[in-house]
Image (tube, rainbow, N blue to C red):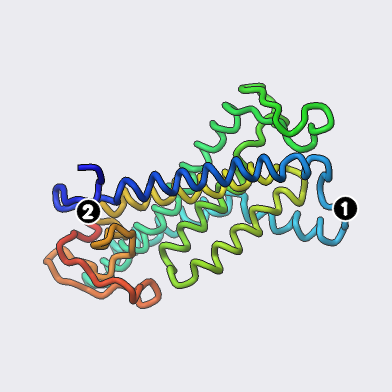
Amino acid sequence: MTILARIKSGRRRVPECRTRLCLLAGSSLVVLMALLFDTAIGNAGRLTCPVFYRIATVLTRIGQSDWCLLVSFLIAIEAAAASRLARTAENRCRALFVSALSSYAFLSIAGSGIAANLLKRAFGRARPDQFSDAGAFDFLPFAGSARFESFPSGHATTIGALLMIAALIAPRHRPILAIAALWLGMTRVMVGAHYPSDVVAGLGFGAWFAWIVALGFARRGLGFRLSSDGNLVLRQKLIGDGGQRYDMPQRAQTSQQEPNPSLSAAAA
């Protein structure tokens, strides 16, 4: 078969053509941004307006992964502990559900950040502050200097991962989340740390990595499931040790998809 959307061991696979199309579209957008805007941004430099520059400096800190990792780690640990202290099977299931989502967020942000840092060193692209000497397309792989670690943007990668995490948990707000992620990512350009193509590549890579991690969780019945059309959605039913089914927390429900009782829930 030419697609992966088939039943194998009771697990649905996402169509291969959809994944390839997304990768092709993302790669094309990165190339277009590089050809159309990177040189112009290199010539212009960072924002010259002090007020907007300060705002961008504050907002760009959202892309730092340390606070994201700390929060998700603490929630995962506390939820796991709460599941052991829960007096009812329903509360235990819900605590495990929260722990699974928090663990997913931690792995997505940590994994994408590590991979992005490896890619930055492998590409060795000069940062915008080196434009006068190196231009917009100078690459020095494994230079051992932060001045040649521009592509992809690490902050944008974290923001992209956060975008995918939030979009899977709150699908109704995806348009707003996408716009917010784009603006937050572009603060890296505003402060003169990256080119636009660095940011677009980081956003796309972070979102893709978080999607892959969510797919792995869904195939193991942890927090997510695959719908009949191959989309990733939150689980709507939690299954206790005795086989009892519980509705998941109201805030996490998505009304567009029907629950799939054939898939298992997060195990204890």
Q: Nearer the viewer, residue 238 or 183?
A: 183
- Quadrant where the image shows the C terminus: bottom left
Give the x, y percent position of residue 38.
Answer: 72, 41
Residue 63, given in percent of the width and then of the height, sits at 62, 52
Q: Position of residue 108 (x, y in %)?
A: 45, 48
Where residue 223 sits: x, y (%)?
Answer: 31, 60
Residue 250's mark?
none
Residues packed near mark 1 inside 10 Å, few (<14), some (14 to 19) or many (20 plus): few
Disc 1: which residue: 48
Assess disc 2: are there few (<14), some (14-19) or many (≥20) residues with their C-alpha within 10 Å of its C-alpha.
Answer: many
- Residue depicted at 51% across the width and 44% down the height: 205
Measured Cα–Cα span from mark 2 to mark 1? 51 Å
Q: Is residue 39 left or right of residue 97?
A: right
Image quadrant holding the N terminus, namely top left
Name the secondary structure under disc 2.
strand
Query: Residue 103 versus residue 196: which sits nearer the camera?
Result: 196
Residue displayed at 82% across by 44% down: 45
Q: Nearer the viewer, residue 92 or 200?
A: 200
**Secondary structure under badge 1?**
loop
Q: Is residue 7 left or right of residue 147?
A: left
> Residue farthest to the left?
242
Answer with the quarter of the image where residue 34 lies: top right
Looking at the rendered structure, the kind of residue marked 2 is Arg
What amino acid is at disc 1? Thr
First in sequence: mark 2 or mark 1? 2
What residue would you read off at disc 2? 12
